[in-house]
Image: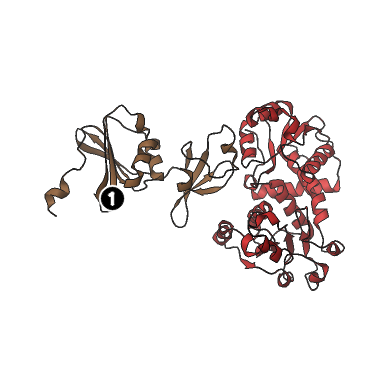
């Protein structure tokens, strides 16, 4: 494969804004949802099933003129822990952000325990976040104290 | 937010030892009129005999007056009132709320909306911390110490919330565990990992008879038929975990049998007459421990 193809952009560059790269390709729409981009009025471009050394396939999102708080971005780490965040100003990467697993989350996930009070009363679910021995992300419900795998809570 | 008791983790080792100390004091002198100006609400959204009577006895012995209900059926909850509104209202009437509710996490939520302390008297299959504290008290009273004991937990170790909380609370006191359960009802992996992380030794057994001699505390639980998917499996194991007086031959003289009650058939009646039976006294201890917890949460234990 020639160098020329390797360096060409599969999703066109933005002038100012945020690039979220190295998203597992099947998590693209969940990331869009978590970042609240379904109702975004800025120019948004994304690609999925792009070649990736890390995943084989990856997805990327480029959002023009939109900058996020760290708390907002860290929510992505729950489903795309290896995502890379680049802040773009005038076509240049001016900052790279490293995602941190949030210590707790409120309102994103739903408790998987059918007997949990949050599934019966109007209560916003809250979880503490941790990784288990196999480094899967686990959520412990603040209320019923049950631990669920992240996958079953999202 | 006032200090509540929702989960056994809410109390530090020092607080646990303080409660046990105060409970001893109350056992010596049962009638202490230190809460004459207090109203305690016992709100039970699902039926309970022992726990409710024990809390009401404890409140009365402290001189407090008790309000509440023992069944949500004839309250405004049946009209669709939210848990939040019920708790808000009751916390305006009473100085402390004792609550049992079938939903898991309901007590934690109540403690967040209440202006007075909440004591969790059982939130579904989740926590029942006053049972754990009375178990610790019973262990300390019978063995003279909490440190360095060997406990054999028997029966339903998978779903039994009392064994899970007791295991966590005992982890402060360098114990050794034997877990005796049928394959279907083994101690869940997360609790075994909890012990491994703290270098607490344990072994798992499927037979009761050969594992009584070397134990200080035999903690029996009920094996419930509804926990088995296959009724045949239940029939196979139900008598394996039945304790009879003849099985106690050769056990340590200090060995005591605990059971959170109610028992069905897992402890034969002839065991009641042996010096090892402690489960009825254990239930009585619940009153002193609950007196101590109530007094502590209302800030009355420092100058007893």
Relative placement, left or right, of B95 versus A50 is right
Residue at horizontal 18 percent and vertical 43 percent from the top = A9
- Percent position of residue B121, x then y: 71, 42
Relative placement, left or right, of A17 versus A137 is left
Quadrant the N terminus of chain A occupies: bottom left
The scheme the figure's colours follow is by chain
Displayed quadrant of residue B291:
top right
Instruction: Please state the chain letter of the residue tagged with numbered disc 1 in the rendered image.
Output: A
Letter of the chain in red: B
- Percent position of residue B292, x then y: 76, 43
Displayed quadrant of residue A18:
top left
The residue nearer to you, when weighing B28 against A122, is: A122
Relative placement, left or right, of B21 versus A71 is right
Label count reads 1
- Percent position of residue A66, x then y: 30, 30
Q: Colour of chain A?
A: brown
Residue B186 visible to the viewer: no
The residue nearer to you, when weighing A109 against B278, is: A109
Q: Which residue is mark 1?
A: A57
- Percent position of residue B278, x then y: 81, 58
């Amino acid at each position: 494969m020639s160098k020329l193809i390797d360096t060409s952009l599969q999703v066109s560059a933005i002038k100012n804004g945020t690039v979220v790269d190295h998203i597992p390709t099947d998590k693209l729409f969940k990331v869009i949802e978590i970042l609240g981009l379904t109702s975004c009025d800025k120019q948004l471009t994304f690609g999925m099933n792009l070649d990736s050394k890390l995943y084989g396939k990856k997805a990327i999102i480029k959002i023009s003129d939109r900058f996020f708080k760290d708390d907002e971005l860290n929510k992505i780490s729950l489903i795309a822990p290896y995502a890379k965040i680049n802040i773009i100003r005038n076509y240049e990467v001016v900052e790279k952000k490293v995602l941190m697993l949030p210590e707790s989350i409120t309102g994103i996930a739903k408790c998987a325990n059918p007997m949990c009070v949050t599934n019966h009363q109007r209560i916003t679910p809250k979880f503490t976040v941790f990784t288990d021995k196999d480094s899967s992300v686990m959520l412990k419900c603040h209320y019923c104290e049950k631990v669920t795998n992240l996958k079953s809570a999202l | 937010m006032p200090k509540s008791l929702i989960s056994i983790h809410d109390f530090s080792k020092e607080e646990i030892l303080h409660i046990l100390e105060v409970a001893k004091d109350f056992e010596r002198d049962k009638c202490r009129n230190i809460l004459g100006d207090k109203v305690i609400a016992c709100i039970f959204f699902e039926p309970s005999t022992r726990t409710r009577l024990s809390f009401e006895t404890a409140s009365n012995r402290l001189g407090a007056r008790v309000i509440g209900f023992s069944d949500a059926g004839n309250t405004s909850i049946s009209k669709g009132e939210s848990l939040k509104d019920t708790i808000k209202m009751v916390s305006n009437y009473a100085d402390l709320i004792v609550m049992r509710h079938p939903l898991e996490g309901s007590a934690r939520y109540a403690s967040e909306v209440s202006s007075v302390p909440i004591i969790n008297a059982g939130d579904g299959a989740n926590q029942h911390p006053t049972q754990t504290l009375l178990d610790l008290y019973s262990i300390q009273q019978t063995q003279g110490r909490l440190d360095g004991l060997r406990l054999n937990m028997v029966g339903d170790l998978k779903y039994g919330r009392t064994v899970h909380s007791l295991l966590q609370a005992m982890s402060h006191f360098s114990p050794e565990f034997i877990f005796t359960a049928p394959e279907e009802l083994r101690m869940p992996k997360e609790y075994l990992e909890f012990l491994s992380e703290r270098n607490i030794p344990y072994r798992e057994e499927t037979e009761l008879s050969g594992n009584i001699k070397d134990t200080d505390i035999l903690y029996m639980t009920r094996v419930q038929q509804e926990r088995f998917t296959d009724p045949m499996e239940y029939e196979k194991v139900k008598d394996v975990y039945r304790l009879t007086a003849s099985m106690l031959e050769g056990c340590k003289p200090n060995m005591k049998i605990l059971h959170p009650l109610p028992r069905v058939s897992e402890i034969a009646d002839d065991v009641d007459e042996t010096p090892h039976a402690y489960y009825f006294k254990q239930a009585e201890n619940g009153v002193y421990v609950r007196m101590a917890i109530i007094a502590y949460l209302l800030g009355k234990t420092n100058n007893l």
